[in-house]
Amino acid sequence: MKRNLFLCPKNILPKKRGFSPSPLRGEDLGGGGVFWMITSNEPKSPPSPQPPTPVGRGGFKHRYFVSHFWDATLVLAVLVSLCLSGCTMAPKYTRPATPIPAAWPSGPAYQKTSATAGAAAAADLKWREFFADDRLQKIIETALNHNRDLRLAALQVDRARGLYRVQRAELLPRVETNVIASKQRVRISGQPGLATIEEYGVNLGVSAWEIDFFGRIRSLSKRALEEYFATEHARRSAQILLVSEVANAYLTLAADRENLKLAQSTLKTQQTAYHIIQRRFEVGLTPELDLRQAQTRVDAARVDVARYTQLAAQDENALNLLAGSPVAADLLPGALSVVKPLPDVSPGTSSAVLLQRPDILQAEHQLKAANANIGAARAAFFPRISLTTAMGTASGDLSGLFKSGSFIWNYAPQIVLPIFDARTWSALTVTKVDRQIAVAQYEKAIQGAFKEVADALAIKGTLGDQMAAQQSLVEATAKTYKLSNARYEKGIDIYLNVLDAQRSLYSAQQGLIAIRLAKLANQVRLYAVLGGGGDSSTPPAGG
């Protein structure tokens, strides 16, 4: 005899003749509550259901619901803990060997670069301690608060942190609730007429939650975490670069303003000499050649005044751009000579200090991210297990939705076993190549950092001699100019020698300014390439 069978709670029954319900307990199906088995075209009358006798408060059905709810919760908690604490298939990370010498370079250019007694390591010296100039400190603080490049780097950190949280959340089940209310009139196969079926339900469940037995999601989460760390170190690198650029722009502006003052002073001196020679020419005491030679020095000084006026304006514009807002005029330096000296920093005795530079740490975290990605590619070769489950209550009457006997549940695990997919092999190859690329980039970053420090040390080792020689040159040319001018005024020498002496003095003075700027700029660069300036911009207490 033909029979249609389905299961539902006992209070969801079509009220129509011809149905044969028979009791079937939830234990028979692994669930709770009492279900009815409905059959059609039975010759005998349906037996009367005999629900179990209630025991205690809420009865058998309430206790069964609570028991199964906590059992399911316990199983879910165990699965979540396994997903969070399990291992991955990523290869064990080993830091690559550094492709640089263990010690700093040695030679004639580095003889005076040994660690200064009492000098602090650059990474331990906060930028407020390194830059003692109060005006420069205020400009750097303004830049840290308003510079757009640094703000963009900080936003990249926030974005990477959000992406990591999204990926990390894949390890946890997504719990959802569902409310159902339906009423339909349908035809039951083998039954005359139509039947009206009502259904109301509320359930709480987990949909397609992947149980990460083989570490695929944990590997992806590890990759996202390392990428987040990399962006944080990129932000620190951007801050170090910004601090050094602001300092260099400040020093360059100071040097150009000092050059401008020198050019203006030279112009004033040359104009005075020109007027004296012009009056002597007018009375016939000086040839016209001397007058024209004096005029050339006046015009050359005028050119330098215009040029350094332009450079100073451009330097100020560059400083405003770095600061992110216009810098107050009282914060701008008047000359390089008024800038407070910078302290010496120690490079240490080993090049291993470079491994703590933010850009090196950024490259290493990117390498770790590529290493973790291999684990995700390997896990793709293994089964993927997901779970969909829900529990709740259902009834054919809205009033009986939360009564005893309305408890329902479902449990649908799924295992997807890859048989053949050529893409997985290619994806694994790509991840391994990505790791090799990351290793090469990490090694390149270390080599580049070593060169930057070596260059700064070479400049430091030779600038002292250059400074001493240039200072001696200025003093010698000043005496030469003074003697030549005195000889000319006494009529012993020609004016051309005076012009040559003055030109030499002016050039030597400009060279001295350039070397002083180079020394300060190199101190800033050495501080930056050794990892200094990446500390917090929060002012000290009372500052």
Image (spheres, rainbow, N blue to C red):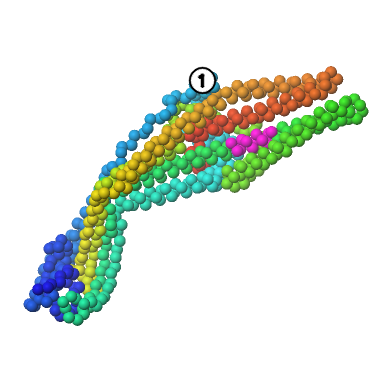
Q: Which residues are magenta?
A: 248-259
Quick one: which residue is furthest to the top in this view? 492
Looking at this view, is 62 or 186 the one in front?
A: 186
Quick one: which residue is furthest to the bottom in this view? 193
The residue lying at 90 percent from left, 25 percent from top is: 285
Instruction: Assess whether residue 53 is covered by the magenta stretch.
Output: no
Q: Secondary structure at mark 1?
A: loop
The residue lying at 78 percent from left, 30 percent from top is: 297
Q: x, y (%) of residue 76?
A: 24, 54
323 displayed left or right of 395: right
Question: Does residue 508 appear in this view?
Answer: yes
Quarter of the image containing the C terminus? top right
The residue lying at 56 percent from left, 26 percent from top is: 459
Question: Does residue 399 appear in this view?
Answer: no
Q: x, y (%) of residue 67?
A: 18, 60
203 displayed left or right of 99: left
Numbered marks: total: 1
The image shows residue 482, relative to residue 229, as above or below, that is above
Q: Main secondary structure of the magenta part?
A: helix
The image shows residue 3, relative to residue 151, as above or below, that is below
The residue lying at 82 percent from left, 21 percent from top is: 494
In the picture of the structure, the residue carrying the numbered disc 1 is 107
Task: Name the residue type under label 1.
Answer: Gly
Quick one: which residue is furthest to the right in this view? 283
Q: Mark 1: give few (<14), some (14-19) or many (20+) Cα within 10 Å.
A: few
Q: x, y (%) of residue 153?
A: 48, 45
Instruction: Assess whether residue 257 is covered by the magenta stretch.
Output: yes
Quick one: which residue is furthest to the left in this view? 44
Quarter of the image containing the N terminus? bottom left
Q: x, y (%) of residue 293?
A: 81, 28
426 displayed left or right of 412: right
